[in-house]
Image (cartoon, rainbow, N blue to C red):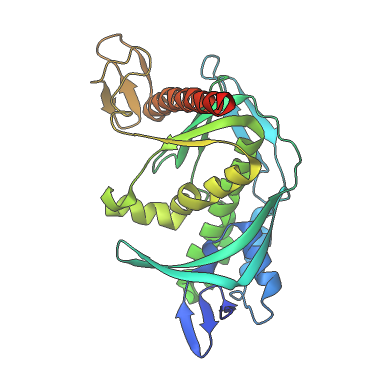
Amino acid sequence: MIPLEPLSDQMVKVMDYQLATDLYRLPSSEYSALVRSAPAFRQPPYLTKILQATFQHHADYVWIRSPESKHQAHLPLLSLPNEVIFTATWDPERWALLERHGEWFLVLWFDLLCTAGSLVGTAEVALDLGASPLVCVITSDGLVETVEKQVPVSLSQFASVFQQDPGLRERVEFELQRAELLRFTLFLVSHAVLICAEDLTYRDMDRNFVRWARKTGLLDWHESWLHNRLATAGIPFEKVDSRGTSQRCSACQYPHGQRDRSEFRCPKCGHSMDAHENAARNILQRGSLKGRQWQRAHAKTRLRQGVA
């Protein structure tokens, strides 16, 4: 294979050809590995200074609350923006160009390692994706979490810089959101024994939402980052049919509930709650059932192999 030579966040060189890419969309461990291995790599001017100033004002915790008591507490997590339990090594000679649904993708290869040792999770976890919040999470032990888009007020001090380079603000916002999603992934990896999410086909989704999901990193996280880290940590990831999860009542399973923006109400049993939480509970129920069915089928296969 002909090795790649990354030149910047948005340019790679292959022999005498240069390809426009979005290398900054990699997870932080993989991005750091690429930067370390590419001597000619250059980041945008002012990026490091802006991120250092912004992360100093960024709270280093996630909010967790119980849906019954509405009690809130914060769980300290690892310092931003580094992922210290995942390390990556880049292989510059392994790469590919793929076309999907009219878009071209540059695929890079990394060896990803989880350095945390044996992770002991206790809960099944379901994820509901959206625009606000980006992610709503329900766990089988009663926790509820949301991940919102991160736009710190401290960015206003760099308004003059962003006026000179409008693309830099989007780059900084993506960096902040990536850090939030990956920090949240560390919570999932340490907490879950099974994670369930919607089996989304972006080709069939509203294009405005796809653009939003790509801009915030949600698409990358759902399609690649989360899956790779869960696989590395040995945590099952079940994708379930999302049809009806927003309309079905998670309490009585009546399929024609009423949703008004972020509120859900069941006309049959009178149950009312946050619409995203309701959808996540339905995803959790479907994912748990799918996981148990897979475990039974796997056990039968092992039994037959043992008898044979």
Q: Quadrant of the C terminus?
A: top right
Q: Is residue 272 left or right of residue 5?
A: left
Q: Quadrant of the N terminus?
A: bottom right
In front: 126, or 146? 126
Q: Residue furthest bottom?
A: 16
* Residue under the point 24% across and 13% down: 267
Q: Is residue 27 above or below residue 1?
A: above
- Residue 262 at x, y = what percent? 35, 30
- Residue 206 at x, y = what percent? 27, 49
Quick check: can you spot residue 49? no
Number of marks present in the image shown: 0
- Residue 117 at x, y = what percent? 76, 40
In front: 262, or 101? 101
Q: Is residue 154 above or below residue 278?
A: below
* Residue under the point 32% across and 23% down: 264
Quick check: can you spot residue 63? yes
- Residue 201 at x, y = what percent? 33, 47
* Residue under the point 45% across and 24% down: 293
Q: Is residue 212 above or below residue 137?
A: below
Q: Residue furthest top?
A: 269
Q: Is residue 240 left or right of residue 191?
A: left
In front: 304, or 62? 304
